[in-house]
Image: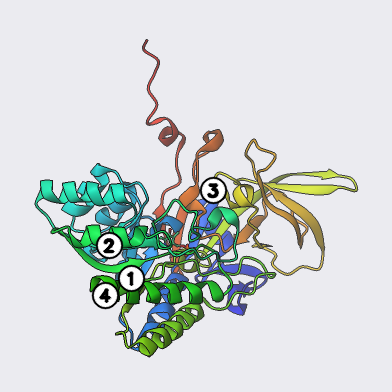
Amino acid sequence: MLDDNEIQDNQLIIGGIPATDLAAEYGTALQVYDVSKIRSQIRAFQRVFKENDIEYAVSYASKAFACLAMYQVLAQEDAHADVVSGGELYTAIQAGFPMDHVSFHGNNKSRAELEMAISHHVGVIMLDNFYEIQLLSEVLADLDETTNVMLRVSPAVSAHTHEFIQTGQQDSKFGFDIITGQADEALQQVLNEPNMNLIGVHSHIGSQIFETDGFKIETEKLVNLMQHWHDEFGFTPQIINVGGGFGIKYTDDDHPIRPEDFVQQILTTLRAETESRGLATPAVWIEPGRSIAGPAGTTLYTVGSSKTIPEIRKYVAVDGGMGDNIRPALYGAEYDAVVANDVHDDNTELITLAGKYCESGDILIKDIELPVVQPGDIIAVLATGAYGYSMASNYNRNERPAVVFVENGKSQIAIERETYADLIHLDRNLTI
Ligand SMILES: *Cc1c(COP(=O)(O)O)cnc(C)c1O
């Protein structure tokens, strides 16, 4: 899982700094991002489009991980950002992120969220359902504004991934269904809205996808739809947005192709499909979340108690768990880990890495062979940058961890560790 330059003197190095130094300076549990990995993945995506001479946007899906500093890195790299809530939008605004590079998603945006997005002139509203077309129409009329929109369609593609994180199949809460004609109906409605400028069509087929077939079928279906809309309604989308979902390596059992290679496959399919029909090649937007944030993140924990049940299992508990990373408990996600202060050691044992939360299911890694650890050792769980902190909770009234950005031997706090005072700052004393 680790590159050679990430291990020095048998120590884990992140962004040029020993992980144990980061743990000592900022405490644990600690979410660390190697910012150079975020940048290089964004650039790898952008390079594919440039090489293929296709107009593009690499729009980072904020839900994987967002904070002020993250939006500032994205802005430096000329990436766009997807937001799905007023809160993500607010964070992007406060970060000074360019609003014309924001796509606003969601299957139940409130009137207040739409008003906020419109008054800040976000780049595009991703229309998800008929109710929203109506609501947005009213908001635009009330505010006397216009906006770009895209139609989110569900292309009925099932990519091979876990059911809970699949969103593109026909039976989905997201988007207008193509097969039953809802997408056509939505198109006609939007073309009749004077304040909406329809710039493209969007779909997203799932997450942590390893197969290219799903993206190929999705692209073909979108081009079919493009042709159908062109022939039937005289409307040709300028942009095809294929969503995100590019799978990453969490453990040595995962063998995904490089995220940018998925994009190459999509572009190859798109070019062949559009050229054979005599359609102009549209711009292509992608929305990677996990593939940008995931591999850049590492979570550092300090080892505390352990418990050996003879012949059955040894549990080693750390000072974090499902409150900072719910994915193993939520859908059986698997991770790899190393002992940050003793990466390679022949004296290993099979353990289960447990969290400190009051749930038997609060297990970070079931069965991992690690060097024998003592209380105080630092365990680093790898590739935790996506859907970890962003799904963090205060379960058991534990403070959410600090988030640190590291690059070229420098580190900084990106999100402070919560304090006990933070935990009660919304609480009010009993008065009735
Ligand atoms: C979640 C989501 C993404 C990002 O998915 P990843 O698996 O993190 O790449 C992109 N687009 C939409 C619409 C999403 O809901």
Seen from the viewer's position, the closer of residues 213 and 92 is 213
Structural distance between the alpha carbons of marks 4 and 3: 44 Å
Give the residue type at disc 1: Ala
> Which residue is located at x 62 percent, y 39 percent?
357
Structural distance between the alpha carbons of marks 3 and 1: 26 Å
Which is nearer the N-term, disc 3 or disc 2? 2
Ligand 1 quadrant assignment? bottom left
- Outermost residue toward the top? 432
Q: Is residue 127 above or below residue 160?
A: above
Please state if 86 lies on the left or on the right of 361 as rendered.
left
Circle 1 packing at 10 Å, graded few (<14), some (14-19), many (20+), is: many
Q: Nearer the viewer, mark 1 or mark 2?
A: 2
Q: Dot 3 corresponds to which residue?
A: 324
- The quarter holding residue 273 reads bottom left
Which is nearer the N-term, disc 1 or disc 2? 1
> Which residue is located at x 42 percent, y 55 percent?
63
Label 1 SS: loop
Q: Are marks 1 and 2 in contact (CB under 8 Å)?
A: no
Label 3 SS: loop
Query: Which label is found at residue 236?
Result: 4
Please state if 359 lies on the left or on the right of 144 as rendered.
right
The quadrant of the rendering that contains the C terminus is top left
Circle 3 packing at 10 Å, graded few (<14), some (14-19), many (20+), is: many
Query: Which label is found at residue 79?
Result: 1
Circle 2 packing at 10 Å, graded few (<14), some (14-19), many (20+), is: some
Q: Dot 2 corresponds to which residue?
A: 187
Q: Nearer the viewer, mark 4 or mark 3?
A: 4
